[in-house]
Image (cartoon, rainbow, N blue to C red):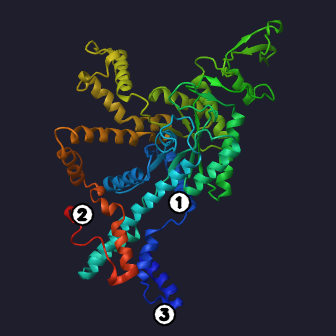
Amino acid sequence: MSQYKDEIAAVQRVKDAAGSPWDEINAESAARMRIQNRFKTGLEIAQYTADIMRRDMAEFDKDKTKYTQSLGCWHGFVGQQKLISIKKHFGSTDKKYLYLSGWMVAALRSEFGPLPDQSMHEKTTVAALVKELYTFLRQADARELGMLFRELDKAREAGDTAKEAEIQDAIDNYETHVVPIIADIDAGFGNAEATYLMAKQMIEAGACALQIENQVADEKQCGHQDGKVTVPHADFHAKIRALRYAFLELGIDNGIIVARTDSEGAGLTKEIAVVNEPGDQGDRYNSYLDCEEIDVSEMAEGDVCINRGGKLLRPKRLASGLYQFREGTGPERCVFDSVEALRAGADLIWIETATPSVADIKAMMDGVRKEIPDAKLVYNNSPSFNWTLNFRQQAYDRWVEAGKDVSEYDRNDLMNAKYDDSELAADADDKVRSFQADCSREANIFHHLITLPTYHTTALSVDNLAKEYFGEQGMLGYVAGVQRKEIRQGIACVKHQNMSGSDIGDDHKEYFAGDRALKAGGAKNTSNQFN
């Protein structure tokens, strides 16, 4: 017996036990509603998706071509449409995740309005977005299954048993739109207790993977801006443990923690680490401080000094009270931070880099993997990089090293559109195309994400529509630029009433009221023009 028929039989047993008051309840209709609502709680989603991520991590360890990917989504509808498109184009959501960007939450979802990426938005907003994303993904399931149920009814009415069996098999083997979300918890929004409480909210909403960074919570900056301030490992590891306790308390024992270090671009620290013995974590952290050796007699009023190897050192301290690291220590600190975070219980690491360079990423990951051979990286394919310029400059440098003629190119002006059809631009684009595969093979990147893509696609599409619609094209700007393309590309949203749940509502009306139901999807529904 199929899963679908099993569910009908289960509801029928409950109905039979209830007796005559339930005579008007249709067991198959109730079974359909159950199947359309597979996940009853966020914790069910968190467990289901954690299992997926753990399976994917194990597969990646055996085969570096099996890396995973995601795009950042700032609204449930955007995430839903992404997954609908993935299923349409690739037939499966396998190894395709969602990323929840703290930057986009700050810029788009705060009640204060647009904010910089400095953890100033409300603590509850991220958990609310996790819940919203999964609400829209579950609705995508209900919509698609509802369409299958309608096809099943048509096949029955036509007496087409082969078609009926085919559709029933599709229902029994239906693949959900629900996929893992890697959710940004920034620097924890406070101390370890605040981090734990916020993590619980996010897990209860469905998040199976939490990404936390080693910046100070009150001075947190976007990873691609200046002024980043890191914390000693003791502080950061307490927050990693807070996340693990939150997962364990809620029963998601295999939840995933992504430890992000911003040390490559962070030149400051707020604290001098505590040293218990020479060579320990705190001592090594302090060894990167920019210090000058002084005599006791040279100490000024209010100076903070440290004893290192019998020498009195005065760390460089800014007017803000922050301490400065030595120039050029960022990559080494990234390796140190990553190794220690994994040893403290993180499952994956995230390293921010100055440019998207396979060689640079590999160099740091080689350092990490000397200590932790199976260390896996989550990498931000960030829109903060000028990918075109970076990769054209990398191509230029390769050509110079290979002795190729570069006389037609100005390295400082390679973004110029005049180079778009050039041989060098084609070389660069080819490396962009293979960047993810190359990095996964060379630097053990398990997950590739773009943090803010849908922020940029929204801005671009609205700009194009505004230019055409309010200009000479008028209504044709919408028709040719949007609707006709939706129809040609099979975009589900062209039937926006169906996407919003109108057909699901009609099904429910029939379940609840039978022949008395007043449905919206009749002959006068203009959406029929898109059938």
- Image position, residue 375 (x, y; %): 57, 39
Three-letter amino acid code of the residue under disc 1: Ile
- The numbered mark at residue 527 is 2
Q: Is there any visible trace of residue 226 in the rendered image?
A: yes
Element marked by disc 1: helix
Alpha carbons under labels 2 and 1: distance apart: 33 Å
Say few, some or many: other residues with alpha carbon within 10 Å of mark 2 (under 14 / 14 to 19 / 20 or more): some
For residue 515, side relative to residue 188 (left or right): left
**The N terminus, quarter of image:** bottom left
Q: Earlier in the sequence, mark 3 or mark 2?
A: 3
| Circle nearer the viewer, 2 or 1 | 2
Return the residue nearer the eye: 172 or 119. Answer: 119
Three-letter amino acid code of the residue under disc 2: Ser
Residue on which disc 3 sits: 20
Q: Earlier in the sequence, mark 1 or mark 3?
A: 3
Element marked by disc 2: helix
Q: Earlier in the sequence, mark 2 or mark 1?
A: 1
Q: Which residue sits at x=43%, y=58%?
A: 137
Q: Which residue sits at x=22%, y=66%?
A: 528
